[in-house]
Amino acid sequence: MSGDAVKASTVQKEQSMVLQKQLIGDYYDSLGRAREEGKRVVSTFVPGNLTELLRSFDLLPILPEINALQSGMRKLSANYIAEAEKHGHSEDVCTYVKCDIGMLKSGNIGPTGVKLPSPDLLLLSYTGCFTFLKWFELLREEYQCPVAMLHVPYLANGRIEPHHVDYVVKQLRTEVIPKLEQVSGQRYDEARLSEMLALSAKAEDDFVWVLESAKNEPSPIDAYFGGVYYIGPIFTAFRGTSEGVEYYRVLREEIAERIRLGLGPVTPEGTMERQRYRLVVEGPPNWTSFREFWKMFYDEGAVVVASSYTKVGGLYDRGFRHDPNRPLESLAEYCLGCYTNLGLPARVDLLERYIREYRADGFMINSVKSCNSFSVGQLLMLRQLEQRTGVPGGFIESDLVDPRYFSSANIKNRIESYLQMLEQRRTAVVTA
Amino acid sequence: MNPELEQILSRAQTLYEDVDYKAVAEWKSYAPGRRAIGYLPIYVPRELIHAAGMLPVGIFGGGDRLEIIRGDAYFQSYICHIPRSTVELALSGRLDVLDGMLFPSICDVIRNLSGMWTMLFPGRYVRYVDLPQNYDARVGGEFWRRELTAIREDMARLAGGQITDRNLRNSIRIYNQNRRAIRELYQARSEAPWLYPIAQVYAVLRAGSVLPPEEHTTMVRRYLEMASQESTLPEDRSRVVLTGMFCEQPPLALLITLERAGCWIVDDDLLLGLRWFTGEVPEEGDAIENLAQAYLTQSVPTASCYAPDGQRGRWLVDAVRQNRADGVIFCAPSFCDPALLEQPMLVAALEREHIPHTQFKYSEDTGQFAVIREQAGTFSDSIRLWSEA
Ligand code: SF4
Ligand code: SF4
């Protein structure tokens, strides 16, 4: 490949990164200015978020999970967690919650240094995680603000049924929308919501194309470490916006170019040229040592071709799209179908499909201490996947934003020995 | 001790120690075709199982009476203990006596355990029971009525028959009687805790997880009557409310330790699902509607249920007042998300009212109580001094 080609792709890559950086910076700035501009803000969660609905009322979403992971990446989380524990929060519970509460107790300065406004409403989208319920009850005590509760039933058998949709839509109509009207002082405008959903679907098409580009060999993306950047806009505040659509258009073009040039993913260590192992990963990443964690894979030539974490905000690659013709129903289906809202058998089925469809050499589970929703049952998932695919799995343990639970040497060791085992297996198959 | 009382307690203790569910097998053996359905904490509508002629069986882990051989291999170290012992019970064949399992929506552990069950035991009946977190009769109520109807159909199918409205109304009546008896026991204990030591109350209550409700009601009533006639003299101890124990159960020895450390337990949330409703479920009219309404309007407040009014902790303050308690002991299983996430809110509610409290964690197989004993002893002494001051 010519030097020019490499340079061109790097420049293009940078374009989507610059765009994303700008989106995030602008977003936090707009939160910082919300009070003086008289804008209302609503805190909510990533899985089952109703971004378009909020934006259709000109409300700005705040996402405490994103604040927590950003704080983790910026090495702020350890102090926040300590602060929360000082206030009586147990060492045993989810560190996102403690990071958020610690941040609040420390003045609510957001990850980019901008002071965050207190929410006018807590939109408790209770999707796929029990902790959400307690988290916002805790925040309600802190902020003394109203809560809109949206109970999203669990898909124990992995299927959305009409009565699930009906229940969620009814709650949107009787609980969520009235509270959004109250907070925003605006009437519900379905036409406006539909317009936004049409933009969402457009971005979602490009997003899925990006995820599926990992079927190429070499893969032009890393669908876990790189994936967390790709999911950023669509899982958070930018679904249903033209900026979001533009981001995914640019990203898609860049990746198409990488495929054309036969390039691997861009990583903090540079373009990944050597792809010795294609992996599927289950579980969220660690944020406090994110770069180091990624490098452990990079150094071994392990590229992640599919991951479940990039599905916590929706299973777009299995066909779901927001539908402007059925606005509330499709929001309900969106909430229902998020990855952690699926029963364990459906999660195993999905991972099995990924292993096959993406021709993975192996799969790795990163089990995080914080998250019972993800973690309970992962050891059985490991066995089931091994049995079904004949592919051995790796298992590592860490945490999301509590650096005390990221044991670098241990994790590196596990990754290396797992990959060595894959290598030996490969040699054995070839010589057999 | 009165011989009948002794007999009741011995029966209750035997049931408590029986991790092989022999009592369930025995019940099944009395008539051909009898079936039993297991359920995990916290609340399931046992009336629907009972109305189908089946035995509801509460699975509360293996406590300190079960050696974990295989169960640990399924769970990371940072997950509570009850799923380990529950899986152990099943893998060792002890739950073969059950014809199905219900997993209610108490937390992500039991939620995911339902999926594990489906994969571990293919072919067995497993149902996740999604309790509504929306309490509007037209919304959450409608959802829950549908769930109840689906469970009713499943239970009828498993039992190989029909559940008539009449049967269901009858079961509601029987469980009303059971809950009423338990409420009376709690009331009596609150008034004279020295007559109803925790070890006795707990074993008698726990028997309700394996006995048919009719039999359990008789046991509770006989126990109440017999124990109230004992001549134990009142003893001055601090009166405490225990909270956090609604799912994974503490070892009995831990509860006894608290008492020995100088506390009378005047209220608690042990085995909460057995006395879920604060009042009676109406016995006439549409039975499904009555069960649904009761859930929406008469459920006990606890960590796994959303509190729409923002009064988290109010119930605990009320429990302290109503039972004239001197303080609260937070006693939660290690790694129990609902209990531990709830705790700071409860602490804040108590502190607003200047109610003393202390806290510690346990696991169902905890075997060391020295620290807990000391802590509870110091707490008890301090609140007694405080209430005398
Ligand atoms: S438990 Fe898991 S899903 Fe829930 S808030 Fe914590 S990290 Fe998120
Ligand atoms: S002890 Fe707590 S975390 Fe564990 S299963 Fe029970 S409620 Fe869930």
Image (tube, grey):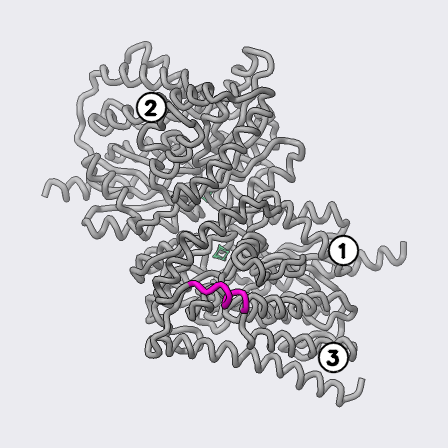
Magenta segment:
A188-195
Answer few, some or many: residues within 10 Å of disc 3's Cα (few below 14, many 20 plus, some between 14 and 19).
some
Q: Residue at x 69, y 65 (%)?
A: A304
Q: Position of residue B166 (x, y in %)?
A: 45, 19
Answer few, some or many: residues within 10 Å of disc 1's Cα (few below 14, many 20 plus, some between 14 and 19).
few
C-alpha gap between disc 3 and disc 2: 74 Å
Q: Which residue is mark 2?
A: B200
Q: Which residue is mark 1?
A: A356
Q: Is residue B73 left or right of residue A363?
A: left
C-alpha gap between disc 1 and disc 3: 25 Å
Whether the residue under disc 1 has CB within 8 Å of ligand 1: no
Assess whether residue B25 is covered by the magenta stretch.
no
Q: Residue at x 76, y 75 (%)?
A: A259
Whether the residue under disc 2 has CB within 8 Å of ligand 2: no
SS at mark 2? helix
Q: Quadrant of residue B366?
A: top left
C-alpha gap between disc 2 and disc 1: 57 Å
Circle 1 chain: A
- Tell me the quadrant of the picture where the N terminus of chain B can be found: top left
Q: Are marks 1 and 3 in contact (CB under 8 Å)?
A: no
Q: Which residue is mark 3?
A: A257
Answer few, some or many: residues within 10 Å of disc 2's Cα (few below 14, many 20 plus, some between 14 and 19).
many
Whether residue A374 can be seen here: no
Name, please, the residue furthest toward the bottom: A4
SS at mark 3? helix
The one nearer the camera, A281 or B31, is B31
Q: Quadrant of residue A264?
A: bottom right
The one nearer the camera, A309 or B152, is B152
Assess whether residue A191 is covered by the magenta stretch.
yes
Circle 3 chain: A
| Type of amino acid at the residue the image marks with label 2 | Gln
| Type of amino acid at the residue the image marks with label 1 | Arg
